[in-house]
Image (cartoon, rainbow, N blue to C red):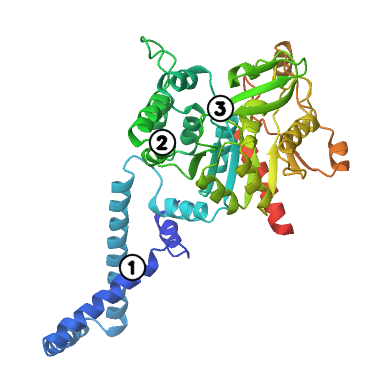
Amino acid sequence: MSSSRRAVRWLQPGLVVKRWMITSGLGLVIALLGAAVWADLQPIYWSLESIRWLLSQVTRVLPRGITGPLVLLLGGLLIWLGLNRSFGSIQQALAPEKDTHLVDALLAQRRLNRGPNIVAIGGGTGLATLLSGLKRYSSNLTAIVTVADDGGSSGVLRRELGVQPPGDIRNCLVALAREEPLLTRLFQYRFKAGSGLEGHSFGNLFLSALTAITGSLEAAISASSRVLAVQGQVVPATNADVRLWAELENGERIEGESRIGRATSPIVRLGCIPERPPALPRALEAIAHADLIVLGPGSLYTSLLPNLLVPELVEAMRRSRAPRLYVCNLMTQPGETDGMDVSGHLRAIEAQLATLGVDERLFSAVLAQEDLGRSPLVEHYRRRGAEPVSCDETGLRTQGYEVMRAALQGTRPSATLRHDPRSVAIAVMRFYRKHRRDS
């Protein structure tokens, strides 16, 4: 984009720059008038007389028809030069290594600040994927994250330090980060060697240390959000030390999120210890002011449903007038959702809500993947025990569900079948805009 076109963009409304420049100019004039009055108006007389003399000398050389435009052009060039250099200096100070021009950054931030209040609920990589796509459309994002993880680095830190598992929260912070890529890579760095360090990510250790220093995971998240310049906020679903349990179809009861994900029989009921954990006030406030509430994508029993074990969150969603959307997974997960279609996922959500006495559908709209068809990648997943999550669109609509389907895996070839951040965000925003038009 040329410099002249970029300069014109400064005139667009909403940048909150022009009004303060005009205010500063007006202030300068008033200050000069005040100084003149204090000096018995003599400076004004001197200034006017000097200007009159200067103009008379200039117009003796060139006629007014030429002098006027030349002086006007000179003044305009000086104003342009001063503003251009000033904004360039500000850009250099704020982001010396970025190619984005200041006016473009301000316009983009204005658009994001005016974006809808979106609450995304879940955990694991699915929630982080959704957030990294939605941050293109709004900076008013709240991620409500499960804290039931007890495997991997998070599980070790939870057992040895007594902290809440930081892994899913770390992923969401990185997904919403606006800071330099090097810092986000540092947060995601996982040690590959070292006694006691192997397998741990730097971000998990950082959050655990901050939790010990600040006294709570919530305060540690706030501090980390400032470090990473997070766009929005990340909130744990509860501040309780939650441990999941599940009853299986064969009558067995297993405990621990990591074991539930490898269940050998279909799950019929999910619960947690302690029962009815409390929600954080920030999570309830975000739901109360939400324009859109999204559940998923993510592991059904270990990332999504644990959030619905917090009664206050469920009640806040029930009271909210915001549209609510469930984003279904692309593939079934062996040991967790074997053989389940979209309808089965929705029944599991409703059954979980029923345990809290909620007999209404909180998520009557679902976003599902278009038919994947046959491909070497799908066959590779089938050999590992996963199947595409089928969607009986007609049957779901007959049951009163609103069904949206899209190519959520994206259009670019990849080695895995995962949600594409951009594709999911586009579909979610299409759903939001449709409901905003209809309301």
Pick whichever, 227 or 70, lies toward us. 227
At label 3, counting other C-alpha atoms closer than 10 Å, the crowd grade (few under 14, some 14-19, many 20 or more) is many
Q: Residue 15's quadrant in the figure?
A: bottom left
The residue beneath circle 3 is 148
Mark 2 secondary-structure assignment: loop
- Residue 84 vs 415, above or below: the answer is below
| The C terminus: image quadrant | bottom right
Counting residues from the start of the chain, the first of labels 1 and 3 encountered is 1
To which quarter of the image does residue 428 belong?
A: top right
Residue 54 visible in the snapshot: no
Instruction: Decide which of tag 1 and tag 2 comes sooner along the chain.
Output: 1
**Left or right placement of residue 189 versus residue 399 in this view:** left
Q: Is residue 313 shown to the viewer in this render?
A: yes
Q: Which residue is mark 1?
A: 21
Query: Is the residue 140 above or below the residue 339 in the image?
Result: below
Q: Give the residue type that dot 2 points to.
A: Ser
For numbered disc 1, what is the local secondary structure?
Answer: helix
Q: CA distance from mark 1 to mark 3?
A: 51 Å
Give the residue pinned by disc 2.
Answer: 216
Q: Dot 1, how many residues are within 10 Å of its Cα: few (below 14), some (14-19), or many (20+)?
A: few
Position in image of residue 406 (x %, y %)? 73, 37
Q: Nearer the viewer, mark 1 or mark 3?
A: 3
Q: Residue at x 79, y 21 (%)?
A: 339
Q: Is residue 429 left or right of residue 167?
A: right
* Residue type beneath disc 3: Ala
Mark 1 or 2, closer to the camera: 2
Work out how far the residue at label 1 is from the one at label 2, CA to CA, in angstroms. 43 Å
The first of marks 3 and 2 along the sequence is 3
In the rendering, at what x and y percent does residue 121 appear?
A: 60, 38
Estimate the spatial distance between the alpha carbons at disc 3 and disc 2, rounded to whole Å: 16 Å
Give residue 352's position: percent from left, percent from top. Answer: 72, 34
